[in-house]
Image (spheres, rainbow, N blue to C red):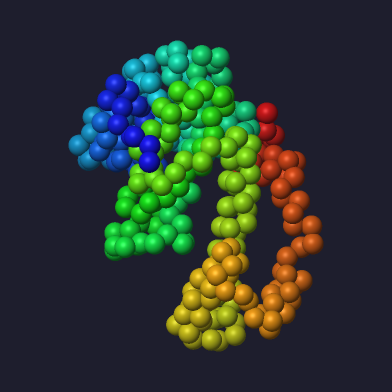
Amino acid sequence: MTDTTAPALTVAVIGAGGKMGTRVSNNLAKSDYHTLYSENSAAGQEAIKALGREITPTDQAVQAADVVILAVPDVVLGKVSEAVVPRLKSGAILLTLDPAAAYAGLLAQRDDVHYAVAHPCHPSVFLERTSKEEWDDTFGGIAAPQEVVAALEEDDDEIRAIAEAVISTIYAPVIAVHWVTVKQLAVLEPTLVETIACMIGDFLHEALEETVNTVGVPREAARAILWGHTWIALTNGLRGSNPFSDACHIAMGYGRESIIKDDWKKIFDDSELDSVIAKMLKIDAVRR
């Protein structure tokens, strides 16, 4: 595991009072980094103060930091970067927590600034949890170990090591950081995990409600069999733990024919990725 202690470094969290900003700030507060917390909204400032942390004006925080984390919503990342990047000191790392804005070319650019993106994988459904605290930490960043996927827009081992140490701190406990390109990270999030996995999770909930409210199956019975079989479906489908029965394969084939479009793999086309990211960021088109 990467050494996460680097006392000489100053890390600034912009948006430290928001949901994600609070999560990463909580872990930085337990580290040896000198951390500066910045927040523009009144509610966010009150949240930071309630945690006993001092608020640093954004301009001061940005100018002093070696690593600046933009913990703000995707739709404002471009605008925030335009205010932040010109004030960064030369050689600083700008770290965003989602790939959409970086992929779309919305981040303000400087040749002497390093750009990194890091997104948490969240604790795996196959993680061997050994405590209630780990079971309760479904999101990650508190007790349950997770992996992280990150991208650095240059080939610099020293900068990557610094970024990985900070990343391993803000998402701790971290098992491993996997380095990919910005485009590959954008394919993972949203295409693989939001367009597909999150949609399927929400679809399972809709199917449960249909089973209960339309067919009339008691909710406890429907929930019990769905939750248990979802685990079996994941272990069999993703890990090959046990083979599906012949009858199950017939039902699975019927499900594919009835529910999944034949051209579903088009979501991996660059044009489709560009389209969905533009919609997510509420812009006309990506600028890459």
Quarter of the rendering containing residue 262: bottom right
Q: Residue at x 69, y 34 (%)?
A: 285
In the figure, 146 relative to 2: above or below? below
Give the residue displayed 61% in from the left and 75% down from the top.
243
Residue at the extreme right of the image, as rendered: 262
Work out whether residue 84 or residue 6 is closer to the camera in this orientation and state it: 6
Which residue is farthest left? 52
Residue 203 place in picture, x, y as percent = 59, 66
Q: Quadrant of the N terminus?
A: top left
Q: Is residue 256 visible?
A: yes
User: Considering depth in this image, is 86 or 254 the residue closer to the camera?
Assistant: 254
Q: Nearer the viewer, residue 106 or 234?
A: 234
For this view, does 95 lie left or right of residue 50? right
Answer whether residue 78 is visible to the viewer in this image.
no
Q: Is residue 49 left or right of residue 189?
A: left
Residue at the location (62% across, 56% down)?
Answer: 196
Q: Picture quarter containing residue 185?
A: top right
Q: Where's residue 236, x and y in %? A: 58, 70
Q: Whole-percent x and y of residue 187?
A: 63, 44
- The residue under the point 35% across, 27% down is 12
Q: State whether residue 107 is above or below residue 148.
A: above
**Quadrant of image for the C terminus:** top right
